[in-house]
Amino acid sequence: DGKPVLKQVKEGNGGRGIAVFDVQASEKIVWDVITSYSSYPKWIDEISQAKTYIDNGTNIYVDFIISAYGVDVQYYIKHLYKPDQGYLTWELDYTRESDLDDSTGYWLVYPSPIDSSKTRVEYSVDLRIQDWVPGFIQTMLAESGLEDASQWVKRESEKRSR
């Protein structure tokens, strides 16, 4: 019926989840939105910084800061980008010290099996948060992260496709 499918499980200081949704835009537009890291602070309320520090086209490293209620959580992500194969994966950049204990996940982007004019997007994340991060930020990340991911990618991709 066009609504995203969201499944999340909270576990200790983190959790995992998956979102699957269709977007009225081409795969190229969806990838352009997902990889426009410098625009994340405009599109995602909790992200105050997204600075790329390495980008060779396949490996993209980004320094993110989430800011909420006066608390900043900084983390460094290493992305492996393979749009020709329909995926982007990520993990923490373990050469730098992040405020997250761990983060891994992926984006899959491919033609919708239900409507050939749409693109199917899958987002999956597994997140572990350091003990010092306040509970309200842990809850925000665990409970709103999936819905937020599906909303901003869909919204921004469909804007560009008009």
Image (spheres, rainbow, N blue to C red):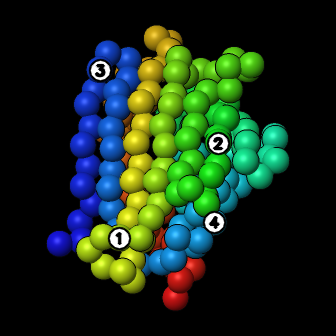
Dot in front, 2 or 4: 2
Residue at the image position 23 percent from the left and 66 percent from the top: 3
Disc 2 to disc 1, how far (Cα)?
Answer: 23 Å
Disc 2 to disc 4, how far (Cα)?
Answer: 15 Å
Local crowd size for mark 1, using a 10 Å CA cut-off: few (<14), some (14–19), many (≥20): some
Marks 4 and 1: CB-CB under 8 Å?
no
Q: Which of disc 1 and disc 3 is earlier in sequence? A: 3
Q: Which residue is mark 1?
A: 112
Q: Which of disc 4 and disc 3 is earlier in sequence? A: 3
Q: Amino acid at mark 3?
A: Glu
Q: Which of disc 1 and disc 4 is earlier in sequence? A: 4
Residue 15 picture location, percent across and down:
34, 27
Q: Which of disc 4 and disc 2 is earlier in sequence? A: 4
Residue at the image position 47 percent from the left and 20 percent from the top: 129
Q: Amino acid at mark 2?
A: Leu
Q: Which residue is mark 3?
A: 11
Marks 3 and 2: CB-CB under 8 Å?
no
Q: Which residue is mark 2?
A: 80
Depth check, front residue: 68 or 65 = 65
Residue 60 picture location, percent across and down:
73, 44
Q: Is residue 135 above or below residue 43?
A: above
The quarter of the displayed image where residue 30 is located: bottom right
Disc 3 to disc 1, how far (Cα)?
Answer: 31 Å
Q: Which residue is mark 4?
A: 32
Residue at the image position 61 percent from the left and 60 percent from the top: 84
Disc 3 to disc 4, how far (Cα)?
Answer: 32 Å
Dot in front, 4 or 1: 1
